[in-house]
Image (cartoon, rainbow, N blue to C red):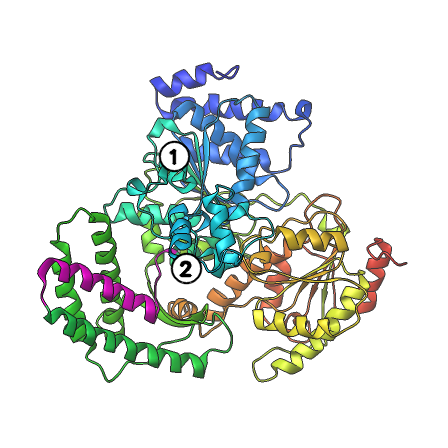
């Protein structure tokens, strides 16, 4: 037992949470008292955040806490969590938005735990099944010859998995393409029935996160896994994560709504839907030997083919770039309601099947239920779903998602059974009261609980940074896209030359990034050009960028979670304000619920993402840098109402639209290498 905590432990065992309030608070102070002699810096706001979390736990309340960049957010929640775990003997669940952050939190837990005397903390990092290699699939690819000749990339990858060189995607240095990895990752685990379970990292992880309450101290998972656990428990199934945690901490909570939508979204492709029907037919025919099934399933496939041909036409006419989510036009020419009726009859037959392969039946039954939901939405008899079409990995995809995200979280997560802590550097908007500042996410998430004081970043933005708004770049819209891109491209080169490279450029559209990358490749540049790579890990390209002190073009994952300290990153360029696409069905639905969509949906959403992106620039007390925004809608002349909201929300208080003033700042601060 850690010195001074034995009384606290006894109180928790013998009394109520209220009995431990003073001892727990005193224990937190003692933890921070150790910081100076351990060589650790106590950051502004860090201790207050720890005390807020302890208070939420003691009073069985939820808490929402914005923790500014640099306060040491992970230590702020890990310290009270270590104490709460010690006295409750129940696990702490920490959910993050990315694998990289999960791994970093695990390192932080090991570090701070050992420094403060918690020597035997049992912890596990849980990732989605798609991050783990499947030896069963890899072996099958090799034996069947589907992996190609022995020197093909797929065959080499499969062989390395079979030889135990690779357990997870992260084990592959330099990364691997999504297409290649999708052939060998875990995608439909047979769990206990698999002959490779004793050496499977996925199977071991799942056993640990679902162990008995007192078998694990910290369970660190991504938000996707936590949400799938909540869904299963809501449906009455056995959950993925152990029951009765002492506390749930959700880091990067600004991503939670999108993660819930993703987890609750059902996706259908033509090939995938036909596979569902084929599997159902095989099971039903094996049981009944009824040949009329073939005719009925053939008719269903014809309906599916008709649907996807129309979706392909919609995408061709409406989608402007990859991954655009578009409306699905009304499906005509097929009796959708009749198709629903047939599917329901088949599912009734599936529900009474008995077999040794119960998991397989359940899987097909669930997939058929999803197909019923799809046809009901298309037929207009189900109104509780959003529906859209997109094109990912060359396949036309139709997606459906329940509208009630906030209701799901309100009753599945914020239900008072376990205290939930939501934290991020970007949870708030402008507003006079805390309730107003947290209101956008409160409404989006169905949050019920307390709002804690915002813990501001300790970094000196006034002295170390300047924001530059490129007022002469024309407004962006689809009609003048090339005119805008050409002007923004020229301004980008001028700005990158100003800081001698060392610039991260954030795009909100891949098509814009591709356009700029192609043009820059044709130029003779004074700095090395880099562009983000396919796949989840970007460590390799970041290392190359730092080594060359060049310019890195990026989108997607680079808007958050990237940490490049020091002079290697001296400028961040926001190519265009990250407004959501108004015609996106999700945002169209959110807009339909409010009086002023721009003010209540589109600007708040843009601000959350903009704050995340601009947070990449200053990562330490000594960092210097320039934030450049190539979107003249923020200029004074544009007279946009949201300009003041942006300036009020971002920490950059020195703002100019004059390039000469920016040049002077860069010279004064020594940001430019060439003086």
**Residue 534, located in which quarter of the rendered image?**
bottom right
Crowding at mark 2 (Cα within 10 Å: few <14, some 14-19, many 20+): few
The answer for how far apart the CA atoms under marks 2 and 1 are is: 33 Å
Q: Tell me the element at label 2.
A: loop
On the image, the x and y values in percent for residue 319 come to 46, 78
Residue segment shown in magenta: 263-290
On the image, the x and y values in percent for residue 594 come to 40, 67
On the image, the x and y values in percent for residue 149 come to 49, 59
Q: Is residue 302 above or below residue 500?
A: below
User: In this orientation, which residue lies closer to the viewer: 179 or 14?
Assistant: 179
Nearer to us of marks 2 and 1 is 2
Q: Which residue lies at the image location 53% right of the left edge and 66% below the top edge?
A: 603
Q: Which residue is mark 2?
A: 146
On the image, the x and y values in percent for residue 447 come to 39, 50
The mark that comes first in sequence, 2 or 1, is 2
The reply, left or right, for residue 352 in relation to residue 169 is left
The disc label shown at residue 208, or none: 1
The reply, left or right, for residue 144 in relation to residue 470 is left
């Amino acid at each position: 037992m850690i010195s001074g905590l034995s009384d606290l432990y006894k109180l928790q065992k013998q009394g109520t949470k209220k009995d431990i309030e003073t001892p727990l608070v005193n224990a937190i102070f003692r933890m921070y008292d150790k910081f100076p002699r351990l060589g650790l810096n106590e950051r502004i706001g860090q201790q207050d955040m720890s005390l807020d979390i302890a208070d939420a736990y003691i009073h069985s309340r939820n808490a929402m806490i914005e923790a500014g960049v640099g306060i040491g957010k992970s230590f702020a929640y890990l310290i009270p969590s270590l104490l709460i775990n010690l006295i409750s003997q129940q696990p702490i669940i920490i959910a993050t938005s990315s694998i990289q952050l999960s791994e970093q939190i695990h390192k932080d837990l090991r570090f701070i735990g050992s420094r403060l005397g918690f020597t035997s903390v049992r912890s596990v990092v849980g990732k989605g099944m798609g991050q783990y290699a499947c030896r069963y699939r890899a072996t099958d690819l090799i034996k069947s010859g589907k992996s190609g000749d022995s020197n093909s990339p797929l065959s080499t990858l499969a062989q390395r998995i079979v030889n135990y060189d690779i357990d997870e995607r992260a084990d592959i240095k330099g990364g691997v393409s999504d297409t290649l990895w999708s052939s060998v990752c875990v995608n439909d685990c047979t769990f206990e029935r698999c002959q490779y379970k004793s050496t499977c990292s996925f199977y071991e992880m799942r056993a640990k996160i679902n162990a008995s309450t007192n078998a694990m101290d910290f369970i660190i998972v991504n938000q996707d896994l936590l949400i799938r656990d909540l869904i299963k428990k809501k449906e009455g199934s056995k959950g993925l994560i152990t029951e009765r945690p002492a506390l749930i901490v959700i880091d990067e909570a600004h991503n939670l709504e999108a993660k819930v939508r993703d987890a609750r979204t059902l996706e259908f492709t033509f090939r995938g839907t036909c596979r569902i029907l084929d599997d159902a037919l095989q099971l039903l025919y094996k049981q009944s030997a009824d040949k009329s099934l073939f005719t009925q399933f053939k008719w269903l496939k014809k309906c599916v083919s008709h649907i996807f041909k129309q979706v392909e036409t919609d995408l061709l006419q409406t989608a402007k770039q990859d991954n655009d989510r578009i409306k699905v036009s009304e499906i005509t020419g097929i009796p959708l309601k009749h198709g629903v009726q047939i599917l329901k009859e088949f599912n009734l037959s599936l529900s009474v099947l008995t077999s040794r392969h119960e998991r397989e039946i359940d899987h097909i039954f669930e997939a058929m239920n999803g197909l019923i939901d799809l046809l009901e939405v298309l037929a207009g008899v189900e109104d509780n779903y959003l529906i859209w079409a997109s094109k990912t990995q060359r396949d036309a995809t139709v997606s459906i998602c329940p509208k009630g995200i906030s209701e799901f979280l309100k009753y599945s997560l914020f239900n008072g059974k376990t205290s939930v802590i939501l934290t991020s550097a970007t949870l708030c908007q402008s507003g006079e009261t805390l309730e107003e500042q947290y209101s956008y996410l409160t409404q989006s998430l169905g949050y019920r609980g307390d709002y804690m004081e915002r813990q501001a970043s300790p970094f000196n933005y006034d002295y170390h940074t300047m924001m530059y708004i490129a007022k002469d770049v024309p407004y962006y819209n689809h009609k003048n896209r090339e005119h805008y891109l050409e002007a923004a491209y020229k301004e980008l080169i001028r700005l990158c030359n100003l800081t001698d490279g060392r610039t991260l450029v954030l795009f909100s559209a891949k098509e814009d990034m591709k356009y700029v990358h192609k043009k820059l490749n044709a130029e003779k540049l004074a700095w090395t050009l880099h562009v983000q790579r396919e796949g989840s890990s970007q460590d390799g390209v970041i290392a190359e960028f730092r080594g060359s002190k060049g310019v890195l073009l990026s989108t997607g994952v680079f808007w958050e979670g990237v940490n490049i300290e020091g002079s290697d990153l001296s400028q961040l360029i926001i190519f265009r304000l990250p407004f959501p696409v108004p015609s996106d069905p999700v945002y169209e639905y959110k807009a339909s619920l409010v009086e002023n969509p721009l003010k209540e949906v589109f600007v708040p959403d843009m601000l959350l993402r903009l704050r995340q992106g601009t947070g990449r620039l200053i990562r330490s007390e000594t960092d210097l840098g320039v934030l450049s925004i190539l979107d003249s809608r923020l200029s004074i002349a544009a007279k946009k109402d949201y300009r003041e909201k942006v300036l009020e929300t971002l920490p950059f208080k020195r703002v100019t639209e004059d390039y000469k003033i920016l040049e002077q700042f860069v010279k004064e601060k020594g940001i430019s290498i060439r003086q």
